[in-house]
Amino acid sequence: MGSAQLLGSAAAMTVLAVGDSHARALGVGMANVSPNRLNLIINDAMGGCGIMESTQYKLSFSDLTDTPSACGTWPDRWAEDVKKYHPQAVFLTTSNWDYNPQMIDNSGKLMTLADEPFRKKFDANMDRAINILSASGAKVFLENSVPNPLMSGVMAAVAARHPGNTVLLDLQSQFCNGQVCPPVIGGITVNDESGHPFGESQNRLGRWLLNQIANTLHAAS
């Protein structure tokens, strides 16, 4: 699961983590394994927020809930992050959050990626996000951690539209075997009770991400 060791080349990188709570958790993992500012990890991911600019959402275990207004600030926040930090790499994940049913227009209907209006808006907002995040030349690293063929296909299509600016990481392969994602791998508990990587899992995935980013950046240099 993930990487036990950080590559020697995975150093002196500035990495921006943006997106939902999974991006935040993995951003923490990358920071944990980069002591003494070996890498500069900027974590601007926000739990409970995707990129759909919805008004309401529905989780499987909760009632219909208003989307916090702060979730809609991502275009300006991320543009400011890029301008301030000039990251070499950006790790973007909203797929876990944006897999939830959301109210995205005035139709009064909760929609998901299976609905055409939702899919069109998701694609448009992902394209906008990638353009913002790559504005200073950063590579934008996407992932496929939701073990669902629809979401995996959507993320592959997004990456294919931006071949020079994006890299699609097979993060799912680090903790899933096909559609099976065991709770414990090699004695390591993958997620906490909230469904997020933590502890050794968080750190191993953070190392794996940094290693993948370093390999990509060095290959391009």
Image (cartoon, rainbow, N blue to C red):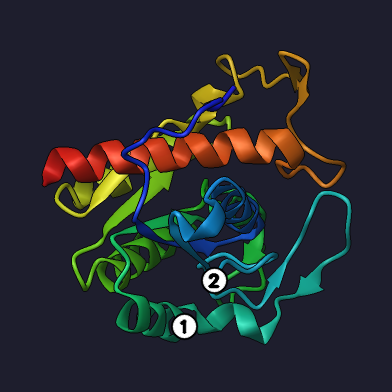
Tell me the SS state at disc 1: helix
| Image location of residue 184, percent across then percent down | 77, 20
Q: Residue at x 57, y 71 (%)?
A: 104
The amino acid type found where label 1 is placed reads Arg
Earlier in the chain: of badge 1 and badge 2, it is 2
Percent of width and height locating residue 41: 48, 62
Give above or below for 92 relative to 65.
Answer: above
Mark carried by residue 44: 2
Residue 105 appears in which quarter of the rendering?
bottom right
Tell me whether the residue at label 1 lies in contact with that at label 2, contact meaning CB atoms closer than 8 angstroms: yes
Residue 119 lies, in percent from the top left, at: 43, 55
Q: Is residue 52 above or below residue 94?
A: below
* Residue at x 36%, y 68% (from the top left corner): 129
Residue at coordinates 56% horizontally, 53% vertically from top-left?
35
Classify residue 11 as left or right of residue 41.
left
- Look at the numbered disc 2 and give the secondary structure of its residue: loop
Label 2 environment density (alpha carbons within 10 Å; few <14, some 14–19, many ≥20): some
Mark 1 closeness class: few <14, some 14–19, many ≥20 residues within 10 Å? few
Which image quadrant for residue 170? top left
- Residue at the spot x=33%, y=76% of the render? 82
Q: Nearer the viewer, residue 217 or 108?
A: 217
Above or below, 80 against 202 in this view is below
Q: Amino acid at mark 2?
A: Asp
- The answer to whether residue 122 shows anywhere in this view is yes
Number of marks present in the image shown: 2
Q: Position of residue 162 (x, y in %)?
A: 20, 52
Real-space Cα separation, disc 1 to disc 2, in angstroms: 8 Å
Assign the N terminus to one quadrant of the image. Answer: top right
When asked about the image quadrant of residue 54, the answer is bottom right
Q: Where is mark 1, residue-wise?
A: 77
Decide which of 115, 196 is in the foreground and name it. Answer: 196
Please name whichever residue, 169 or 42, is drawn nearer the observer in this view of the structure. Answer: 42
